Amino acid sequence: MIDDELEGTLSLQLDNVDFDRLLRAVAKIKGLSFYQENDIYYLGKASQHEQYTEKMDEPVAIVGESLPSEMPLVSTTVKLHFAKASDVMKSLTTGSGSLLSPSGTITFDDRSNVLLIQDDARSIKNIKKLIAELDKPIEQIVIEARIVTITDESLKELGVRWGIFNPTEAAHRVSGSLDANGFSNISNNLNVNFATTVTPAGSLALQVAKINGRLLDLELTALERENNVEIIASPRLLTTNKKSASIKQGTEIPYVVTNGKNDTQSVEFREAVLGLEVTPHISKDNNILLDLLVSQNSPGNRVAYGQGNEVVSIDKQEINTQVFAKDGETIVLGGVFHDTITKGIDKVPLLGDIPGIKRLFSKESERHQKRELVIFVTPHILKQGERMEMAKKEKHFKQIEKAKK
């Protein structure tokens, strides 16, 4: 008979132990009451005055586990430098693999990030070993992004400069090499597609290339001076392994929502933003798997509903993909196109402004310009020295911002 209040698990390896001796061993290990009456065994919690103290006639051979007397409890503190004390405590106490003895306790101080442990000396030694494995710095990654819009002509020009040609959209191969202009040589099977032919509007593409970041910045800066490239944003995102980082730029559009039950109205907002979300996963060989989500959502046409009501639609374009990159490689995302139509009048000076005859010396013109949204993403794993330098720069920038206020 086992007391209903008893619960938990106990793992033992036994050698030629009968049932009676097994129950006596369990009772002694866990401090339970145990007795036998009329061939019935009773096992339950010991009261203050009733605890099993009967000595066994023969020692029980329990492989890998001795039956020591109750060991004195020792209190200690462990200062954590990288991991959160609450997370480490959860790892030490959750599940059946807890390293604490039945008498052991553990708590934490969130302010000082310290663990407070009370247990026997042997358990504390094992716990400290595991804490040392858990309290290690997590690899950090800087993700540099360059979000630009570029004309179709300039995009073709970049393709010629890089020596990349794509005769067919299905092949996804490149011919030649990228040795020119200081770029590293790349094999012919890379999915790089700065197309020299017109790509259908609205199509999405993913291009990957190993590009020298400094030279890329020089190329973009030169094109910006020629008004062929508009650099929308150049964010630097700092995150840790397997933690997402994101940036958004845009606006929120209000919508009036009516509750059908009580006819009450409320205002909700939907985002119309340019967004980039990146989640890096670092492998053992320092390759980086990037989960990339790029969204280009913009206000669309006004849509009428009900009686005289209108709402603004949202035009959504998204790229959601995974791609491998080495430390320092640049991922190129593109394929979101915008057609801009500019209307104007070409006229002969003076004569084109004379009423009655100005139409003879002027004409209306319409110019189409195709621009593509292109995003360059470069992940870089921070080394220990670089982390300290990055922390100093962030502290310096915060001081500057505080001084401005």
Image: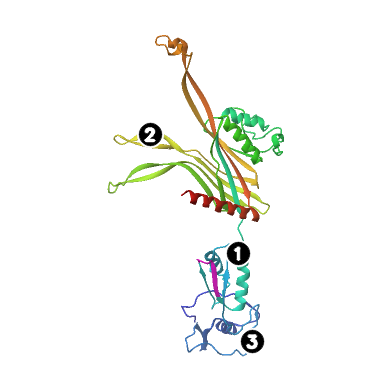
Give how far across and how far down residue 206 sits, in percent.
59, 38
Rendered view: 128 above or below 237: below
Q: Secondary structure at mark 3?
A: loop
Residue lying at 52% horizontally and 65% vertically, measured from the top left:
86
Identify the secondary structure beneath mark 2.
strand
Tell me which segment is drawn in magenta.
110-117
- Magenta residue check for 68: no
Query: Which mark is on residue 59?
Result: 3
Mark 1 lies on residue:
134
Q: Residue at x 45, y 9 (%)?
A: 360
Q: Residue furthest left?
A: 262
**If you read the primary sequence from the N terminus, does the residue marked by circle 1 or circle 3 appear first?**
3
Neighbor class of circle 1 (other Cα within 10 Å; few <14, some 14-19, many 20+) is some
Of all residues, the one furthest to the front in this rendering is 403
61 and 96: which is toward the camera: 96
Do labels 3 and 2 touch, CB within 8 Å? no
Number of residues whose C-alpha sits closer than 10 Å to that of mark 3, classed few (under 14), some (14–19) or many (20 or more): few
* Figure check: 109 above or below 344: below
Task: Read off the residue under disc 2.
Answer: 302
The answer to whether residue 207 is left or right of residue 344 is right
How far apart are the two marked residues, 1 and 2, measured between alpha carbons?
55 Å
Q: Residue at x 63, y 48 (%)?
A: 380
The CA distance from mark 3 to mark 2 is: 87 Å
